[in-house]
Every structure is written in C-alpha cells, then in structure tokens.
Image: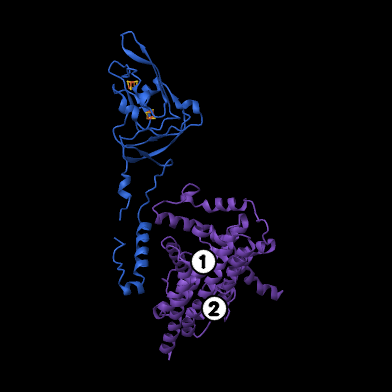
Amino acid sequence: MEYVLSLAPLFIKMAIVVGILLLLPLPLTWLERKIAAHIQQRPGPMRVGWHGLLQPLADAIKLLTKEDHIPAQADRMLFAIAPVVALVPPFLVFVAIPFGEPVQIFGTTVTLSLADLNVGLLFILAASGIGVFGTILAGWASNSKYAVLGSLRSIAQMISYEIPMGFSVIGVVMLANSMQLSQIVAAQEGLWNIVVQPIGFFVFFVAGLAEAQRIPFDLPEAEGDLGAGYHTEYSGIRFSLFMLAEYLVLVFLAFLNVLLFFGGWLGGPAFLPPFLWLFIKVGFFIWVFMWLRFTFPRYRYDQLMTIGWKVLLPLSLLNILVSGFLML
Amino acid sequence: MARTGVKQSSWIGRVFFADLLAGLRLTLGYMMSKTVTHHYPDHEKWVPYQRHRGHHFMNTNEAGEVNCVACGLCSKICPCNCITVIPFENDQGDRRPKVFDIDLARCLYCGLCEDACPADAIKLGQEYEVSTTNRATLKVHLEDLIAAPRKSEDGGDIKPAKLDSAGSQHSILRPESDAGRDWWSRVRRD
Ligand code: SF4
Ligand code: SF4
C-alpha cells in the first residue's frame, strides 16, 4: 500500500503530461494556420467558433471519420506500426524534461518532472533519434515512389544533422558539468547559455529544425515536389498520428532550446510562477518556428547535406574547442 | 523597404545571413499588418465602382415610359445571344418593346448591349448577387428591368453589411450605413 501511494503522484503527473500532449496539437494547428494567414495578409479560419478557434476540432472530426486506406501490395504490418513508431519517441522525450523546480503542494514536495534523469540530455537525443524510424518505415511500407523518396531523404537528413546536433550541446554540458537538465538550467543562474554559447545555439537551432522536419528542411514531406513525402499514402487516423508526432517534436525542440540556452524557468518576473515563465518562452520558440516556416523556401537535397557537413559540423567542433579553451 | 540592404558581394552579409534576416523582417512586417480579406458575407460587402458591370436595368423617361425603341441592336451585338426583343407600336405611335427578355444564365456581363444602345435604355449596374438554385428565375423580363435599382451614387469601398435572407430567395446583403472603408489603403505595395 505504501508503495502504491508513493507511485500515485507519478501516475497523476503522467496522466497530466500525456493528456496535455495529446491535446496540444489542436491549438497548435490553429496557431499555425493563423500565423500562415497573417503573414499572407489573410485572417485564416474565421467561421468555426470565435476567430476559428473550433476549427481544429472540426478538422479532427473530419480526420477521424475518413476512410483508413492501405495501398495495394503495401507491407501491411509495417504500414500499421509506422505511425506509432513515429509517435512514441516524442512522448518518451517528455519523460526527461523538467518543467520547473520542485514545489510544495499540501506539505509534500512534488518534482515538476516525470524523471529527472542524470543522463537526461543523452536520453532525449537518443529517444528523439528513434522518431526517424517512423518516417523510414512509413516510406518503405507504402509501396509508393513518393513515399520512398521521402524516407530516403529523411535518412540522409538524419545522418547529416544528428551529429552536429549532438556536438552542439557538448558546450552546454561542459558548462554545467552535468547532463541532467535541471542541473543545466541551474547552471544558467545569472547568465543564460545563449550569451556564452551563441554558436552552439545556432547549430542546435538549425539542426533542430532539420530534426523536426520543418521548413526550410522539410525534405521528407516536401508537399511541393513529393506529394506529401513519407505520409503520401496515409489517411484518416494514421495520418493524424503523424501530424501529432510532428507537432510534439516541434514542442519538445522548443523546450530543449529554452532549457539548454535560454535559462529554462529562470529569470522570469517575480509574480509569474516559474513553469509559466518557461511555457511563455517555449511558446515564443514555437512562434519562431512557425514564422520561419512561412518565410523560407525549402532547401534542396544537396544543399541540405552541404549545410550539415560543411557548415554545421565544423561550427559545432569549433564551438567545443573554444568552450574547452575558455574553461581552462 | 525590407528587400534592400543585401549585397550579393558582401561576404559579411552572407556569414550573418543578412538575406535570411531581411526575409524574416519582411514577413514579420506582414504578420503585424492588417489583413486585406473582405469579411463577406458575414460583416462586410464590397460595393463596386460605378463603372462595374453588374445587374441589368432599363431606364425610363419622365413620362414613365421605357427609353427603349426596340431597335434590336443590343440583341444583335450580344455575343451570347441572350437578349430577346419583340417590338410593337403603342397608342402614341411610338415603337416600344413588347417583349424584352435577358437570359442572365448566358450573359457574360460584357456590357456591349449598353454600348450599342442608341436610346440610353439598357444599362448595367452594381448589383452582383444573382446566384440562385432555380434557373428559371435567371430569365429577367421588361418589368424586372424597369423595377431594378439604378446605379448607386457611391461605390468602390467596403461597407458593413449582413446577410438578409428574409422575403427573398436570394440572400442579399444590404449595406447598413454609408460609412465605407477604403480597401486599397490596407494593401501593402513594398
Ligand atoms: S452584357 Fe453582354 S452578354 Fe450580357 S446581355 Fe449585354 S451584350 Fe449580352
Ligand atoms: S435596349 Fe437599346 S439597343 Fe436594345 S432594343 Fe432597346 S433601344 Fe435598342
């Protein structure tokens, strides 16, 4: 009984996080459409609910009632599990993300994270790396040229971006002497990492865009030249799983950017609870990602590889070198 | 405005992504500017300029008789062959149309009938909401043309309006007030 009681807060926290994550794409699609619209001087969805606020619900109902179609000669099992493979890693990643310092509720100390692992950063990079398998499997299983091209691109993209991304956070780890995200945030008391690690931030940000497969690096799904890339053949609920995964990756990248380089929950005004301050920063980054999406064209396949290997990789190595010298 | 400041030759600009930043600044400016979309048919309605070629109407003289002398020039020139004119002689010995039908389902609103008319009779106005689910109602007759509204004095702006479906099978928007807004003022030209 004691044991079960001690587990109860964990399950409650888990339920809250999973619930929020499942619902988050609804406001995010609305936001994305609104931002796209306003950049193009349109008002965006206006007619379902106040300023189109209920539009995502209408979209969700439409998606869930669509025919679930599997192409002829597709690998049915892989086709079915690919969306799940894509969806699980973003959820997994949120296990290790802290949302604030421990707080006192009803006299007990509650940590605002599911598990503040001491190898948190490593775990996150590793777990998020699995997400690309969803893309690869989906393209492979679809029996469609466009989908295969999309997943080929995503493999090349993953190879050229995971490495600079891993290197770019080493500077942060060196500064904090820890891979635990709460420690990394605590080490930024007084001075955010963006000040001392601007190159690291730049590399991480760009590599993160590629990781999230967002414009200007959305080659795997490139609506313009590949139909919809790896999820061309998906429809209905399976397609919405992919969309869900995509938005969650976006959110977790915004979280990582804030936690690693922008001081996490530190430095907010006194009247704001720290976790709200964190969410404001994360919201800002989400907005920036969307702003980028509707500003830039898509990079070509070879340009993407060039940026990854010839620009970001040397930059991240340089960053490690410089931070090493400065720490000595 | 935002597209300047990027020199092809400047390597400093390339290192610090001056071109990308210029693009971001431009889209940020657009994000903050007002939208240009007409909120039609919910709140607003575009009232066209006087030169707009919309609904047909038939002018009448002081005595209340139609100006038309049934010469048939409009039906000759009409590229869609959609005007039917059958003349007759009235009590004063004037030549007038007995039948004057326009099949709006075929009309392309070119305005040639207006140009060809020697008697200042057939004209095109500013109303454009003629859609219907019943094709028969698209055939307008002489009485309809005489009763149709004339050209309105103003035009070329957006007026507050709302959907009014009572009493007619068309949903017609009625401008509620005369204070229109100039749509062009919001269009960015940089
Ligand atoms: S506007 Fe053109 S198409 Fe229409 S009735 Fe007149 S001449 Fe014919
Ligand atoms: S409307 Fe004008 S052009 Fe047509 S028949 Fe009458 S007078 Fe002639």
Question: Which marked residue is nearer to the observer: mark 2 or mark 1?
Answer: 1
Q: Locate residue B157 relative to residue B165 in the image: left or right.
A: left
Where disc 1 sits, the SS reads loop
Chain B as rendered: colour: blue
Of the 4 image quadrants, the one containing the N terminus of chain A is bottom right
Could you tell me residue A185's position as x and y percent?
A: 48, 78
Q: Name which of mark 2 and mark 1 comes first in the sequence.
A: 2
Could you tell me residue A57's position as x and y percent?
A: 55, 52
Where disc 2 sits, the SS reads helix
Q: Residue at x 65, y 56 (%)?
A: A71
Within-10-Å neighbours for mark 2: few <14, some 14–19, many 20+: many
Q: Residue at x 44, y 88 (%)?
A: A324
Q: Work out whether residue A318 can be spotted.
A: yes
Q: Which mark is residue A213?
A: 1
Nearer to us in this view, A225 or B97: A225
- Judging from the image, mark 2 belongs to the subunit labelled A
Chain in purple in the render: A
